[in-house]
Amino acid sequence: MGHDGVNKTKALYWASGIVSICGIIFQVLFGAAGSYLLGDGVKQYTLVISLFLTGMGIGAAISEKVTKNLILSFVWVEYLIGIVGGFSTFLLFGISAYLSQGTDAFFLYSVTLIIGTLTGVELPILIRKANEIGETLNRSAARVLFSDYAGGLIGGLAFVYFLRPELGLVKTAFVVALINIIVALWLLFYFRDEITTYKKHAGLGILIFLVLTAGVFWGEEMAFSLEQKLYRDPIIYHDTSDYQQLIVTKEQGDVRLFLDGQLQFSSSDEYRYHETLVHPAMATARSKRHVLILGGGDGLAVREVRKYDEVETITLVDLDPAVVELAKTNHDFISLNDDAFSDPRLTVIHEDAFLFMEESARFFDVILVDLPDPNNESLNKLYSLRFYQLLRNHLAPGGSIMVQATSPTFAREVYWTINQTLEAADLVTENFQVDVPSFGNWGFILAKREATSLEPVEIEADTKFLSGDVMRSLTQFGKDIDQFIYNENGELLEWEINTLIHPIILEKYSESWRRY
């Protein structure tokens, strides 16, 4: 092999590493986009990875037929990856905004399979070309595959630590697509002596490059206008943290917070939710000196807790600093939470709630669990028997726990599974359901070490909605949403317990909300 052959072979190895980086980024990008728009992150990543790998297998089979014009074939594969991959997330937002439900999932999975197939064609072509230049098959395959695997690691790290937090989903797709086009043009130029019409192909590649470059600069802005269609009101704040996407909308004074597309509160009626979350637990606790809030980074639960002069410490544990920062600095949030984060009694800890409960040695008089619904594996543990046992073990004598437990109307089985799991943790429960117009009917569960009657309990704090009588009325459940479900033989069904090993609540949640 001559000097020129050595240089060309090195170029092929570099190309294989770079396109492998692009391939893994597209793979995790599609998983992230699916999690955001379709929910259930574990499910979306599983499907995306499976489809991508299946596509690679299909691509590898297709590559058997590519035996001539190897570089030109590779260039066209990169062109197709650039076009399809570059516009993938941009179009996904448009489809989610304008087309019927389910079309976005079909589009995402189709694009994943297409990009996976094209990626599967890449490496066999490069191996075959390296072998054609003069490398032995063993050597060329080993080096190309090494570049592929090493590139995969780099791509994954780049996406997690730079691309997603700094560029977002839409711009990342365009940038990675540009890299594919650059690699194609580079190899096209490097092997121009083998391609008589390389100028024509290079011209087309430059045109695609310019279109994708425009996407880098203006695609996100256009996608933002498409994303606006997903929300009823104008978006006034948009950010992507290390953990989730934050959207704030506002229309005629109604401020709404969305995390990964899921509504967290509406300022028009959030007081009904937060008063029910906080005051029954505070009213039934023997002492109110030390209060723990798990979640609640918006500060609205803190606002309600601050109404009690007896409170000495408030500990807020929220995983995402971006949510707390928004609540501390945005004037709409400050107005809503009554500048809750200025309270000297408040300590904010940014940590996973499960880990905090495992590591903490403190006891609390009141524990308020205001965590997102159990729609993925990482959240399931916060609705598990082990987690509720941890809460019980950190509850001071006479203390109270209040858990937001999704909707007994929309997710009846989920609600009562949470109740059963709390009872399995040796806690005595009382069930509440309240109408929150922006959410619909919503459920809470009060848990204590001992049974407590609500009859003598009054709400002493200043509230807009809740009183002692109203609180007691919230414990009444209609027959269509109560805990008694019978099979076709008329036998009463027993509720299961949600555990870390057997996360039954995930499937129940997905199935319940699919109907609404």
Image (spheres, rainbow, N blue to C red):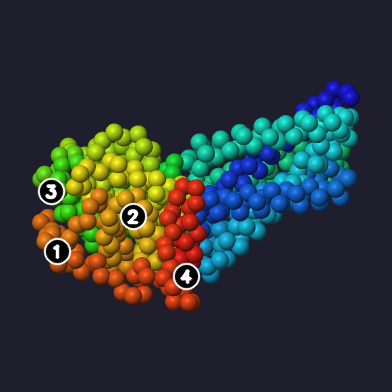
Write down the residue under mark 3: 308
Residues under labels 1 and 3: Cα distance? 21 Å
Q: Earlier in the sequence, mark 1 or mark 3?
A: 3
Of marks 4 and 1, the one in the foreground = 1
Label placed on residue 455: 1
Would residue 61 be found to the left or right of residue 241 on screen?
right
Residues under labels 2 and 1: Cα distance? 22 Å
Vertical comparison of 450 with 319: above or below: below
Q: Residues within 10 Å of mark 4 (few under 14, many from 20)?
A: few
Of marks 2 and 1, the one in the foreground = 2
Looking at the rendering, which quadrant does residue 457 occupy? bottom left
Write down the residue under mark 2: 423
Q: Residues within 10 Å of mark 2 (few under 14, many from 20)?
A: some
Q: Residue placed at 36% from the left, 75% from the top?
A: 480
Q: Earlier in the sequence, mark 2 or mark 4?
A: 2
- Which residue occupies the foreground of this view, 430 or 258? 430
Q: Earlier in the sequence, mark 3 or mark 4?
A: 3
- Report the amino acid beneath label 1: Glu
Would residue 457 be found to the left or right of residue 328 on screen?
left
- Report the amino acid beneath label 3: Tyr
Q: Earlier in the sequence, mark 2 or mark 1?
A: 2
Q: Earlier in the sequence, mark 4 or mark 1?
A: 1
- For numbered disc 2, what is the local secondary structure? helix
Q: Earlier in the sequence, mark 3 or mark 2?
A: 3
Would residue 106 be found to the left or right of residue 269 on screen?
right
Vertical comparison of 102 with 284: above or below: below
- Report the amino acid beneath label 4: Arg
Of marks 2 and 4, the one in the foreground = 2
Write down the residue under mark 4: 515
Look at the image and tell me in which quarter the C terminus lies. bottom left
- For numbered disc 3, what is the local secondary structure? loop
Q: Residues within 10 Å of mark 1 (few under 14, many from 20)?
A: few
